[in-house]
Image (tube, rainbow, N blue to C red):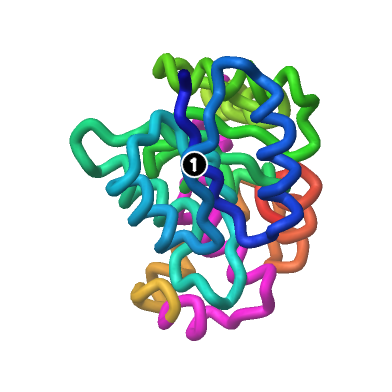
């Protein structure tokens, strides 16, 4: 049996995932978590093979899914983490994969695809949504044009309306470093302004 932990702050989503997964003869739901912190605790306490991890949790959770993934996978003998989320931009996928997620699936995936991804994760194999896999391949083909994780983070904050000073404070960077990141972002995206950079990045699925 593949023992599963479902981590999502929405009870309806957890119930839906449970209903789909319990129909598979080789799956057993052993725990559920409504916060990222609780997911980290249960992953350490319970006998779990795969954690199905959401990326964004409500105000009751100080951690996000990527941070919880990093905390879970840092332990020896840790369960695999399969991210199951509605977000598929680089701003979401890159931190999650860098944190140690084995797979990344979208919540609108067919039940059979979800089951296959869980089995792949349990076996230590990658399982990626097609849109995520396509963009990762594109990053590999054109590395010079791909935004780094930090550049994606900076541009995401700019898209949220933060000034350079606010971005520098949020990320604990100097304003000169923020400006340098923006210059590199403009060059890679072929634009010459913050507004154009945000528009282009959203069009390419790099940020939300």
| Residue 24 appears left or right of 168 | right
Q: Is residue 190 visible?
A: no
* Magenta residues (range): 141-169
Q: Residue 188, how many percent across, how many down? A: 60, 44
User: Is 56 above or below relative to 79?
Assistant: below
Residue highlighted by disc 1: 5
Considering depth in this image, is 151 or 119 the residue closer to the camera?
119
Give the x, y percent position of residue 139. 56, 29
Q: How dense is the environment of label 1, judged by Cα within 10 Å: few (below 14), some, or many (20 and up)?
A: many
Camera-side residue of 10 and 149 = 10
Residue 10 against residue 69 in the figure, above or below? below
Give how far across and how far down residue 89 sits, in percent: 66, 45
Residue drawn at the location 58% of the way across and 28% of the way down: 136
Residue 56's image quarter?
bottom right
Image-based side of 191 in relation to 162, left or right? right
**Image location of residue 133, percent across then percent down:** 62, 24
Secondary structure that dominates the magenta span: helix
């Amino acid at each position: 049996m593949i023992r599963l932990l479902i981590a999502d702050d929405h009870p309806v989503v957890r119930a839906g995932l449970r209903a789909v997964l319990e129909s598979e003869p080789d799956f057993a739901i052993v725990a559920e978590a409504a916060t990222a912190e609780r997911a980290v605790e249960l992953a350490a306490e319970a006998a779990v093979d795969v954690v199905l991890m959401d990326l964004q949790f409500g105000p009751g959770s100080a951690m996000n899914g990527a941070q919880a993934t990093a905390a879970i996978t840092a332990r020896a003998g840790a369960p695999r983490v399969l991210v199951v989320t509605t977000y598929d931009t680089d701003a979401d996928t890159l931190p999650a994969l860098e944190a140690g997620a084995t797979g990344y699936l979208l919540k609108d995936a067919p039940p059979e695809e979800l089951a296959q991804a869980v089995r792949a994760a349990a076996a230590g194999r990658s399982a990626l949504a097609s849109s995520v896999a396509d963009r990762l391949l594109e990053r590999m083909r054109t590395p010079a044009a791909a935004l780094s994780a930090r550049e994606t983070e900076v541009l995401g904050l700019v898209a949220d309306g933060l000034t350079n000073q606010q971005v520098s404070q949020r990320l604990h960077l100097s304003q000169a470093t923020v400006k340098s990141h923006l210059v590199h972002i403009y060059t890679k995206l072929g634009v010459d302004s913050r507004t154009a950079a945000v528009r282009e990045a959203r069009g390419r699925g790099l940020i939300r």
